[in-house]
Image (tube, helix red, strand yellow):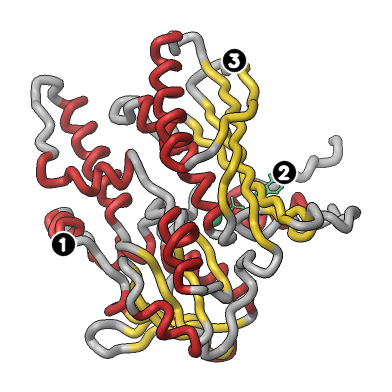
Amino acid sequence: MGQEIKRTDVNELGEFGLIRHLTSKFPIKNASTKKGIGDDAAVIDNGDKLTVISTDTLVEGIHFDMVYTPLKHLGYKAVVVNLSDIYAMNAKPRQITVSIALSNRYSVEALEELYDGIRTACEWYGVDLIGGDTTSSPKGLYISVTAIGQGEKDKLVYRDGANVGDILCCTGNFGSAYLGLQILEREKQLYLDNPKIKPDLEDAQYMIERQLKPEARKDFVEQFFPKAGLVPTSMIDVSDGLASELFHICTSSGVGAILEENGVSIHPKAEELAIKFNLDPITCALSGGEDYELLFTVKPEDLEKVRYMPDIYLCGEIIPAEEGVKLHTKGGNIHPLQAQGWQHFQS
Ligand code: ADP
Ligand code: MG
């Protein structure tokens, strides 16, 4: 009998465990590498300015379904999800590279559509497409975008800067993109069962748009923060779900938090749809993901700077690590927050 070869399933480690496991033996060698793995983007010190870099890959069948994803939207989203990570560092995106791997199912016309979406995002967010790679895949489409941004030395914001007493803030509303996905999946099933049925999506327009064509919070990083003279103490973008991102801030900063359910905004249409689907609206908001809003903390003395910002919600406070990460419900109960996020391999 030969010796058994050890085989560990990647799901045993989970996404973050796997990243840690694979990258723990890569010490930083260059002084210019200011931040490596473990934040929304890596940071490189170029003297006067800091360069910020982030990569994300979207895979057909995992991150998008061609049955209901227009290629133009897909191109737009592939760019936006990366820019969101640059904004989460309080930096401005400047360039992107785009790499695609495609099967022979994709025509030139289809790829033109994809690039139409990429171009629209480049125009709106003011970034240049500066390179990439094109290759073939045995099955499906892969699109990997790297975003490069620029930040100022004293203004970059990491996940690890939250302090006890800081105010927790978030932009926009939560849960809509997740509910958009639920409705698209249900309509797909109905369509597959009976292709003659016309989808009834009128009431769900907002949620579907949040799922298929998300936006990154350029307005906060490029307008509201500088105008108010505000530099948050920590920040993250909400790709995996508000609860799971709050845990990232708390773990990195070595603090706890109390999240106010009252401060988590849910679009009225999303709330309606959640109830129609028999889902708990606040669970959708906390664990849904793909909102691409910003979650950040500010010093208590900066309260006046955030109080009147548009589309901002004060949603809690940073507390000592020993007190944990908790949710204060609308009903007045306080219980430990569950970080569900995407357990399976998605991001
Ligand atoms: P986000 O959700 O903000 O896009 P991720 O959770 O994808 O961030 O990644 C967390 C950190 O791990 C980032 O610093 C990212 O660059 C790094 N990372 C992810 N996958 C790998 C990998 N395969 N090898 C090296 N670093 C990785
Ligand atoms: Mg991120």
- For residue 137, which quarter of the picture? top right
Q: Residue at position x 42%, y 74% from top?
A: 169
Confirm whether residue 284 shows in the render: yes
- Look at discs 1 and 3 and give the one toward the viewer: 1
Kind of residue indicated by mark 3: Ser
Q: What residue is at 50 percent from the left and 66 percent from the top?
A: 226
| 333 up-or-down from 135: above or below | below
Q: Quadrant of residue 109?
A: top left
The quarter of the image holding the N terminus is top right
Residue linked to disc 1:
268
Query: Which secondary structure, mark 1?
Result: helix
Residue at mark 1 to residue at mark 3: CA–CA distance: 43 Å
Q: Sequence-wise, which precedes: disc 1 or disc 3?
A: 3
How many numbered discs sit on the rendered protein?
Answer: 3
Q: Is 4 placed left or right of 240 in the picture? A: right
Vertical relation: 231 (above or below) 267: below
> What residue appears at the point 30 percent right and 26 percent down from the top-left corner?
67
Q: Nearer the viewer, mark 3 or mark 2?
A: 3
Q: Amino acid at mark 2?
A: Arg
Q: CA distance from mark 1 to mark 2?
A: 48 Å
Q: Which residue appears at 51% of the width and 18% of the height? A: 139
Find the distance from the CA under tag 3 to the CA under tag 2.
29 Å
Q: Nearer the viewer, mark 1 or mark 2?
A: 1
Q: From the Cβ of disc 2, is ligand 1 less than 8 Å away?
A: no
Q: Are marks 3 and 2 in contact (CB under 8 Å)?
A: no
C-beta proximity under 8 Å, tags 1 and 2: no
Q: Say which residue label 2 marks.
A: 7
**Residue 248 locus on image (x, y percent):** 56, 68
Q: Which residue is mark 3?
A: 136
Q: Position of residue 153 (x, y in %)?
A: 70, 64
Q: Amino acid at mark 1?
A: Pro
